[in-house]
Image: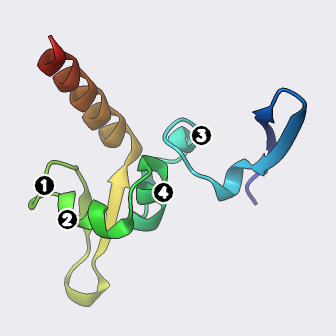
Amino acid sequence: MARQSIVPLALRHHEVARVNVSETPDLTTATRRLALRPAEAAKALGISARTLWGQTAPRGPIPCLRIGHGKRQTVLYPVADLQAWLSRQAEAEKGDDQ
């Protein structure tokens, strides 16, 4: 069973909310896992699942792994590949701004 941790989230200087990390995957907390399912990857990237699917290789630049065949095929998004893709996107944005 996965260990759940609670992380404080600052709302204002005097208010603090508690967020369950296991319910809000992101690319830094997800590094314990090798890959994310589509809904988890979309949430971690802050985009809709539909946008993620439209930008997933071969249609777009977001890398994924397709495991299995036919109706039993599973699409996974390796966390390391997502982080590398985000880094390349950030570098490209920096290059465009200059």
Amino acid type assigned to the residue bearing label 1 in the image: Gly
Residue highlighted by disc 3: 29
- Real-space Cα separation, disc 2 to disc 3, in angstroms: 25 Å
x 37%, y 67%: residue: 49
Q: Of label 2 and label 4, which has the lower sequence position?
A: 4
> Foreground residue, 65 or 45?
45
- Real-space Cα separation, disc 1 to disc 2, in angstroms: 7 Å
Residue highlighted by disc 1: 60
Q: Which mark is residue 95?
A: none
Q: Which mark is residue 43?
A: 4
For label 3, count other residues whose C-alpha is less than 10 Å away and answer few (under 14), some (14-19) or many (20+).
Answer: few
Q: How is the image coloured?
A: rainbow
- Real-space Cα separation, disc 3 to disc 1, in angstroms: 25 Å
Residue highlighted by disc 2: 54
Amino acid type assigned to the residue bearing label 3 in the image: Thr
Q: Is residue 28 left or right of residue 38?
A: right
Circle 4/circle 3 CB separation < 8 Å: no
Which quarter of the figure is the N terminus placed in? bottom right
Circle 3/circle 1 CB separation < 8 Å: no
x 54%, y 35%: residue: 28
Amino acid type assigned to the residue bearing label 4 in the image: Lys
